[in-house]
Image: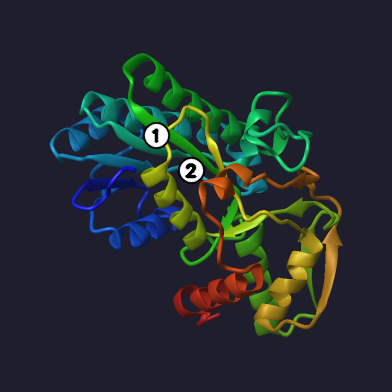
């Protein structure tokens, strides 16, 4: 077991939804959280990252920093999604190695798996088929991060591990309709429809694709668990264990928000992968399980949105 008490842990991406959740969770472990101010440290610049890491006495690193977004953002910014994520992960991993940091956890994404891989997705499905085109640039970068951790483990003996979270949501999410993922986008759409008295909200595509959702605080708990308990070259899935259609998710969101109008479909928009459910058997067998139900998590997330962004709309 890797003891966190008394250690200095750099949470790269501490302002993001996942990074902030990890920082909150680590606070209860008696460790010191180290963070990098993006105004001073550009994670895409190797010299910046090496200068930051070199004099901090860091013991462990959680790589939660990434450029993220939904289908629209991925389709319109392919270069940024590939380049930015490659640079961020490569710089952090190399700088950690150079500084003698022997414990690192890299966060990937469920989009690393082939579009038509058997469901639920198991860890060994990686690189067995073509990726989903709507997010392949991000996926390729995340696959490279997994392989980097494996390479540094193989060549230098570094105890670097990778975890692949499913679709995440929760406090601190991005609710910008131009760049957000499906959950926060639906919450904002339903909220604005309720505020304006609209008769309907629009859902992209047919609503039939099925997706799995995990609350960010559950994800953070799983990541700390892996940081303490796991040491291996193979990445580990971090999922909820059940999925839901986008249409049924929309109904849940409307119920939480209190919007009673119609749900209509924009069939000009792509559905993406038909189904994406990850197997979390390995993690459950290690002794970890999620605790926040989807319904409760949506209510909590909407309340956070109201308190932080939506109250004045």
Up/down of 49 relative to 182, above or below: above
**Horizontal and vertical percent for residue 177?**
61, 60
Q: Quadrant of residue 203?
A: bottom right
**Horizontal and vertical percent for residue 254?**
72, 76
Up/down of 79 relative to 305, above or below: above
Up/down of 249 relative to 308, above or below: above
Badge 1 marks a residue whose secondary structure is helix
| Residue at 49% across, 23% down | 147
Callout 1 crowding tier (Cα within 10 Å): few <14, some 14–19, many ≥20: many
Q: Which residue is mark 2?
A: 67
Q: Residue furthest left?
A: 55
Residues at circles 1 and 2 in contact by the CB criterion of under 8 Å: yes
- In the figure, is residue 11 to the left or right of 303? left
Q: Which residue is mark 1?
A: 88
Q: Quadrant of residue 292?
A: bottom right
Q: Quadrant of the N terminus?
A: top left
Callout 2 crowding tier (Cα within 10 Å): few <14, some 14–19, many ≥20: some
Whether residue 105 can be seen here:
yes
Q: Which of disc 2 and disc 1 is earlier in sequence?
A: 2
- In the figure, is residue 114 to the left or right of 23? right
**Horizontal and vertical percent for residue 67?**
48, 43
| Residue at 32% across, 17% down | 156
Q: How is the image coloured?
A: rainbow
Badge 2 marks a residue whose secondary structure is loop
Whether residue 69 can be seen here:
no
**Horizontal and vertical percent for residue 211?**
72, 53
In front here: 239 or 131? 239
């Amino acid at each position: 077991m890797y003891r966190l008490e008394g250690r200095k842990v750099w949470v790269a991406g501490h302002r993001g939804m996942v990074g902030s959740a990890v920082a909150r969770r680590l606070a209860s472990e008696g460790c010191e959280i180290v963070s990098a101010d993006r105004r001073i440290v550009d994670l895409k610049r190797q010299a910046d990252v090496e200068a930051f890491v070199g004099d901090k006495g860091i013991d462990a690193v959680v790589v939660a920093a990434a450029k993220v977004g939904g289908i629209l953002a991925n389709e319109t910014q392919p270069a940024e999604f590939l380049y930015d994520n490659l640079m961020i992960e490569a710089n952090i991993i190399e700088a950690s190695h150079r500084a003698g940091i022997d414990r690192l956890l890299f966060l990937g994404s469920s989009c690393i798996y082939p579009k038509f891989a058997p469901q639920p997705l198991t860890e060994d499905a990686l690189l067995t088929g073509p990726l989903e085109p709507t997010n392949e640039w991000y996926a390729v970068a995340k696959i490279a991060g997994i392989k980097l951790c494996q390479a540094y483990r193989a060549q230098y003996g570094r105890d670097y591990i990778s975890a692949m979270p499913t679709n995440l949501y929760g406090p601190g999410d991005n609710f910008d309709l131009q760049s957000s993922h499906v959950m926060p986008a639906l919450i904002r759409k339903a909220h604005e429809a309720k505020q304006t008295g609209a008769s309907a909200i629009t859902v992209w595509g047919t609503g039939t694709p099925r997706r799995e959702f995990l609350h960010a605080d559950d994800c953070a708990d799983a990541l700390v668990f892996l940081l303490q308990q796991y040491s291996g070259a193979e990445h580990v899935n971090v999922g909820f264990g059940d999925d839901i259609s986008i249409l049924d998710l929309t109904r849940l969101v409307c119920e939480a928000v209190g919007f009673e109008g119609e749900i209509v479909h924009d069939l000009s928009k792509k559905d993406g992968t038909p189904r994406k459910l990850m197997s979390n058997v390995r993690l459950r067998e290690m002794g970890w399980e999620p605790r926040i139900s989807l319904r409760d998590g949506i209510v909590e997330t909407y309340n956070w949105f109201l308190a932080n962004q939506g109250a004045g709309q």
